Image (cartoon, rainbow, N blue to C red):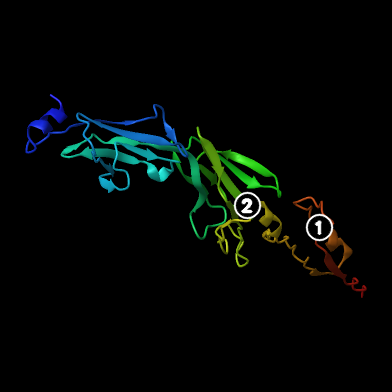
């Protein structure tokens, strides 16, 4: 029985329509900047049929026909789409837009202060579909050059030191492409008040630099001043002896061999003349 035949015999007859399916004209995965068409079919084809379209349950406006074009696609187009005609509504279909990593950034933990010799972790964050599979870490070594540090979503300094100051960035990659984060400048300053094992790095200014490698020559590499060990001033020992023989009686072999002249101890000997016989 056709819908038109029902309309001819009675204008009061209620027509029951059923939405058969909602199809996408792309068989494989859809990617960013692709163009696709959603097609809605029903059991009847009536003149001036008005389809309603929905995304994630919310109505879409502007396309009353049986086809809904989309494109160029962006990640924001990802969602569940459905169409409706009369009382019939289709089963939702998922439009999953694939795209390369974007919004790549570096996050630091702990923050904002760390302790000299403590552990520091950098994390590479991003937004990608499918999720990024490869992460690579770099440190800027010049305006156009960089040093590869390692791979993984995180990069850890087991014992942070002022020599680790510099510009860092990470690269996130999936099957559709890759993207680098902006440079993160980290300057670790050792507190001038205490250079012991528990000294606190005065500040922890890690911030993103939009200038990238151009900012490298402006960096102020802060390094801790190393204090040279000071030697003790030799003490002069005074002794009063009556006879030359007493000198030898009081002499002892040095316990530690003298190898450095600066380490020698000096003694002042006062020898009194022997008394004349009566």
Which x, y percent locates residue 26? 39, 29
Q: Is residue 136 above or below residue 220?
A: above
Which x, y percent locates residue 145? 70, 44
Q: Secondary structure at mark 1?
A: loop
Which x, y percent locates residue 178? 54, 39
Residue 225, quarter of picture: bottom right
Residue 136, quarter of picture: top right
Residue 131 visible: no
**Residue at x 37% of width, y 35% of height:** 37
Q: Quadrant of the C terminus?
A: bottom right
| Residue at the spot of label 2 | 167
Crowding near the residue tagged with mark 1, few <14, some 14–19, many ≥20 C-alpha atoms within 10 Å: few
Residue 74 falls left or right of residue 250 = left
Task: Say which of 16 and 201 sits in front.
Answer: 16
Q: Are marks 2 and 1 in contact (CB under 8 Å)?
A: no
Crowding near the residue tagged with mark 2, few <14, some 14–19, many ≥20 C-alpha atoms within 10 Å: many
**Residue at x 55% of width, y 59% of height:** 198
Q: Is residue 97 above or below residue 274?
A: above
Q: Nearer the viewer, mark 2 or mark 1?
A: 2
| Residue at the spot of label 1 | 251
Residue 211, quarter of picture: bottom right
Which x, y percent locates residue 104? 51, 47
Task: Say which of 33 and 241 sits in front.
Answer: 33
**Residue at x 34% of width, y 35% of height:** 38
Q: Earlier in the sequence, mark 2 or mark 1?
A: 2
**Residue at x 30% of width, y 48% of height:** 61
């Amino acid at each position: 029985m056709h819908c038109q035949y029902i309309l001819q015999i009675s204008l009061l007859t209620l027509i029951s329509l059923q939405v058969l399916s909602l199809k996408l004209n792309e068989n494989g995965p859809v990617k960013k900047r692709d163009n696709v068409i959603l097609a809605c079919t029903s059991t009847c084809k009536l003149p001036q049929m008005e389809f309603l379209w929905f995304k994630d349950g919310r109505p879409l406006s502007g396309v009353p026909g049986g086809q809904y074009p989309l494109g160029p696609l962006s990640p924001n187009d990802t969602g569940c789409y459905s169409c409706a005609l009369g009382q019939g509504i289709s089963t939702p279909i998922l439009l999953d837009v694939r795209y390369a990593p974007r919004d790549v950034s570096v996050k630091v933990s702990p923050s904002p202060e760390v302790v000299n010799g403590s552990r520091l972790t950098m994390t590479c964050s991003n937004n990608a579909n499918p999720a990024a599979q490869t992460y690579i870490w770099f440190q800027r070594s010049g305006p156009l050059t960089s040093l590869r540090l390692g791979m993984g979503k995180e990069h850890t300094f087991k014992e942070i030191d002022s020599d680790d100051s510099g510009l860092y960035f990470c690269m996130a990659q999936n099957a559709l492409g890759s993207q680098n984060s902006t440079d993160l400048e980290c300057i670790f300053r050792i507190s001038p008040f205490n250079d012991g094992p528990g000294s606190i790095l005065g500040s922890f200014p890690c911030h993103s630099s939009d200038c990238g490698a151009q900012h490298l020559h402006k960096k102020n590499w802060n390094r801790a001043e190393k204090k040279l060990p000071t030697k003790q001033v030799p003490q002069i020992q005074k002794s009063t002896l009556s006879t030359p023989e007493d000198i030898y009686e009081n002499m002892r072999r040095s316990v530690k061999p003298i190898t450095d002249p600066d380490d020698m101890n000096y003694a002042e000997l006062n020898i009194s003349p022997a008394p004349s016989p009566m």
